[in-house]
Every structure is written in C-alpha cells, then in structure tokens.
Image: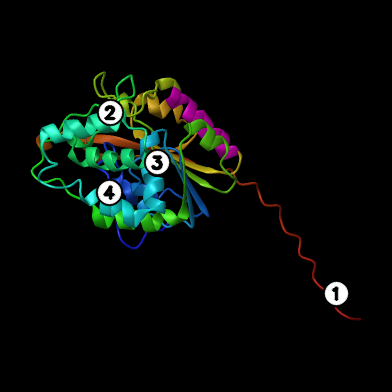
Amino acid sequence: MQLSQRKSRAFLKWAGGKYNLVDAISRHLPDSELLVEPFVGAGSVFLNTDFPRYQLNDINADLISLYQLIKSQSERFIADARDLFTPLTNQRDCYLNFRQQFNQSSDAYERAQLFLYLNRHGYNGLCRYNLSGKFNVPFGSYKKPYFPEAELYFFAEKAQRALFSCSGYQQVIQNAEAGAVIYCDPPYVPLSKTASFTGYAREGFTLDDQAQLANLAEQAQRRGIAVVISNHDTTWTRKIYQPAALHSLQVGRSISQKGASRGKVAELFAVYLPKTRPISPQVIVLPQKAG
C-alpha cells in the first residue's frame, strides 16, 4: 500500500494516535478500492494512505458528528472554530464553562465546535466521559493551544472520499464488502491494571471484545477481506491472534505526560490475509501442423 504523497497530522490530539506508526502499518495494508476503519480515532491512517474510498467508523458519536460537519461545512466550521482559540478562551474558568455547555447541549454543530475546543485545551488531549456520558477531562493549562487550521482543511478535502458511521465494530466488520481492507485500532489491552483507557466511550472495551474482534477478523478473512489489527504485544494478544501473521516492533510510549517516563513498548500487528485458492494447471493446446 502506497502512502499519500505528504505526511499529514490529525487535527485532533489523540491518545494512541498512529501518526508515528503510519509507515509500519501501511506496509501491511494490501491494495484495495476500499479501506474500512472500525476504530478511526483521529484518523492518521486515513490521512496518510491513498485508497480510492474509505469507510470510517467510531463508537464515539461526538467524533463522527464532528467529522461529518467538517466534510460538509468546512469553511463555516473552521471560521467559527477559530474564534474559540484566543487568550480569553484559554483560561480555566472559560474552559469549565465551555465543558458544561458541551455537556448540556443537544445541538450537533455547537457540540462539534466545543469538542474541538475541549480537545485542544483539555489535559493531554484526552477524550473521556463519565458513566453519565458527561465529558470530564480537566483543563490542560497550555500556554497557547494550537489552532489546527491547515490540518482541518486537509481533512475536509480528504473526507470527500469517505463515508462516516457511528456503529459497533462488530456490525462494521460483518458488513464489509469482499475485497476490502480493514484496519483495526481498538483500545489496547492494558499493560497494567491502571493503564486502561476505558473512558473513551461509556461502554468501554473488554477482554471479551478483544477476543471477539480476533474472531471477526478470521471470519472476514474467509470472506476474502484482509484485516490488520494493532495492539500491545503481550502473551495474551499473541494467543488470540494466533491464526494471523504476527509482526512486532518497539515504539515510543506516547500517553505519559512526562517525556522522561515515555519508554519503549512492543507493538503487535496481526495480519489476516485472504486465503487464495490454488490455481489449476493451465492446459495449452498446440495447433496441429498441416499435413
């Protein structure tokens, strides 16, 4: 799979974003007319590959609503969002007021604007909801939050190739068309009891989900679909991905706020390529000579 000509960053800050792994991931993605991402997140793989069509899904309704609005109303959206990135809006009281406004709003456009603001002004770029579905990330206290105007415009242009959906990963994989390529970036298996980011969506992502995702990848493989899953390289993930071709590499940890504590962790790619049918020997009939 060829990368897009220029490497582009996502306009959202995102725990577990794949910008630094795009080259490694792309090496395992076969050519296809369609790339399906059941866990699109900030979209780094989408932004840095060159498939003719994309189906981009996420369980986070706020994220998908934001993407759909940028696709359809990019000029208006970017102009309005720019007004939320000023010295006056980069204060704790203002942030908390906007966070409350976001949690009380049912207007899709307002929520999308505030979602971008909260992402760039909140602590460490986290996206976290409590059990009541309220966004609860604290203020980030950054000197001057970056307004990602160029990244927003690039996303809006590339999004014209994409269809966005907000469904469960099971439905997306089961409905994928033959010949598609699926890249799965699920919430990772935690390396410790305190390392799990289950607050991204209220439902969380359990070990049962991890095993079910592996089973769905095998089923998709039998239907002629290539599937690539990324996760932490652990004994357990190697067990559930046993039927796949496994590739491991060391990557820098990007979740910890303190740079000095960001060590190396092992990343695992499970690659399920469709089984090709054996080709029957071709019988060549030579023309008979005259006479």
> Label 2, label 3: how many angstroms apart (C-alpha)?
16 Å
Mark 1 packing: few (<14 Cα in 10 Å), some, or many (20+)?
A: few
- Report the residue marked by disc 4: 11
> Label 1, label 3: how many angstroms apart (C-alpha)?
68 Å
SS at badge 3: helix
Specify which label sits upstream in the sequence, 2 or 3. Answer: 3
- Decide: is 84 above or below 151: above
> Label 4, label 2: how many angstroms apart (C-alpha)?
19 Å
Closest to the observer: 143 or 176? 143
Specify which label sits upstream in the sequence, 1 or 3. Answer: 3
Q: Residue 132, image x and y in percent?
A: 33, 20
- Report the residue marked by disc 2: 135
> Label 4, label 3: how many angstroms apart (C-alpha)?
15 Å
- Report the residue marked by disc 1: 288
Q: Residue 5, image x and y in percent?
A: 34, 63
Task: Kindly identify which numbered label has been placed on residue 65.
Answer: 3
